[in-house]
Every structure is written in C-alpha cells, then in structure tokens.
Amino acid sequence: MRLTHKVAVITGGADGIGKATALKFVEEGASVVIADVKEEAGQELAQSISDTNGNAVFKRTDVTAYEEVEDLVQFAIDTYGTIDVMFNNAGIGLNKPFLDHPVEDYHKVVDVNQHGVYYGMLAAAKKMKELGVKGAIINNASVFGFVGTLGVTGYQAAKGAVVMLTKHGALELAPHGIRVVGIGPGGVDTNIVQGYRDRGLLEYMERQQLRRKLIDPQEIANVVAFLASDEGNVVNGTVVMADDGLTAFKSDIRP
C-alpha cells in the first residue's frame, strides 16, 4: 500500500493508461480523481471503484482549458482535502503524413498533449505550494518525445515539449519539495496506438520492442505508481523509459 493517504488526480483517466493507473493507485491505497472528457466511461470507472470500497470520483475536464484544470485540482482538494499526485496523462493522436497533416489537427494535438500537461503542472504546483505538500507531478511523455517516426507530426512535437517541461518543472519546483518526473511508454495497447494500424505502424512498433508485442497498460501503471510513491523520491527531473527497449538501439524508422 505505497500510496495510502495520498490523493491523486489523473487526466485522461477513463481508459487506457489512465484507467489502469487509477485502478493501480486505488489498489495501493490512494484516493483518486478521474478526469476526462469521456463522461460515461469516467463515471462508470469511478462507480466500479466505489462499489469495491475504493475511493474514486469523476470530474469531466477538458485539459485544453486552464480554468477547467484549475477547477479539477480544486475539486480534488474540496473532495479529499489535499492533492499529492498529479498524473498529466491525457493525450490524443491524429496520424497523417507530414505533407497531408492539416494545421488545425496539429494545433488540436498540441493543445491536448502539450498545453494540457503544462496546465496540469501549473495548477497542481500552485496548490501543492499553497498547502505545503511535497507532491509528485508525473507527465506522460512517450518514446516519441525522443525518437522520430512517421505520420505523427503534432504528437511528436508535443511529446518532445513534455520532456523539457518535465526537466524545467523539476528545477523550478524543487525548492518547494515538489518532484516532476516523466514516463516514456513505448507501444502500449491503447486506442491511440491501435490507430497506427491502418498505416502499418502498429506492426512496426511491435517489432521494435524487445518482447515483440505491445505493452499492457497495467505494466505502465505499475511504473507510474512507483514514481508517485515515496519510494520514488530519488527520481526527479527525468523521463523514465517504459518502452521494452524500443529506444535502446538505432534502426531504420521506416516500416
């Protein structure tokens, strides 16, 4: 029970990595606020956790609106009394070749995957400082913040920014006892990754990982839980790769 008495907020918490992390956090003793634009799935997850005597609530949140993220953090405090962990996990992927990538799609992806992380960091850090909480902010970065691939222009730009936001946030917030760390998943079996199938990238990603298969979201949740716990206190200002070796070697980026 590494997260007993801790309060965690998880954006993009209704499915995929977010859902797996919510379940893992509750298993480890945390109270969880699930945030997502997918209201039905988010409500169902929170209810299922509550039905098994876990502590979880849902709040619909669009992470591209700073005011909504501020409200989310305040909701967590109003509900559970504090905020100890902020997992900025919400993300989308729109997969098209560079020359066919509409400008509006680029902005949409960056708004969610980059600006949403910044808003979560800022809103959580302000309240942690105000409450005197030595908390942990965890950002979902991705291997695509480090290596290039085809057809994910906005996604790569945003995830590269998340890597640097993580480093910068750790430097700025260390005086307040707040850690900022990132996690870099490889090919995880989520809706975003499944969206690569029509361009042949899914099979390519499976081949690039050392076990030759997609990662289960629960495996990523296990790492996030460690980073959120006091056992992970020495991990700060860096992105922990959880990619089954995808970034361990150089290879042709083309499928």
Image (cartoon, grey):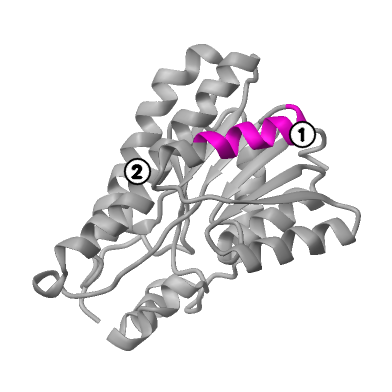
Upstream in the sequence, badge 2 or badge 1?
1
Check disc 2 and give the amino acid type: His
- In this orientation, does residue 153 appear? no
**Residue 96 vs residue 221, the one in the foreground:** 96
Label annotation for residue 115: 2
Q: Is 75 included in the stretch rendered in magenta?
A: yes
Q: Which residues are magenta?
A: 70-81
Looking at the image, residue 6 lies above or below residue 213: above
**Residue 71 vs residue 10, the one in the foreground:** 71
Helix, strand or loop at mark 1 = helix
Looking at the image, residue 13 lies above or below residue 176: below
Give the CA separation, mark 2 to mark 1. 26 Å
Check disc 1 and give the amino acid type: Tyr
* Residue designated by label 1: 80
Secondary structure character of the magenta stretch overall = helix
Q: Is 89 included in the stretch rendered in magenta?
A: no
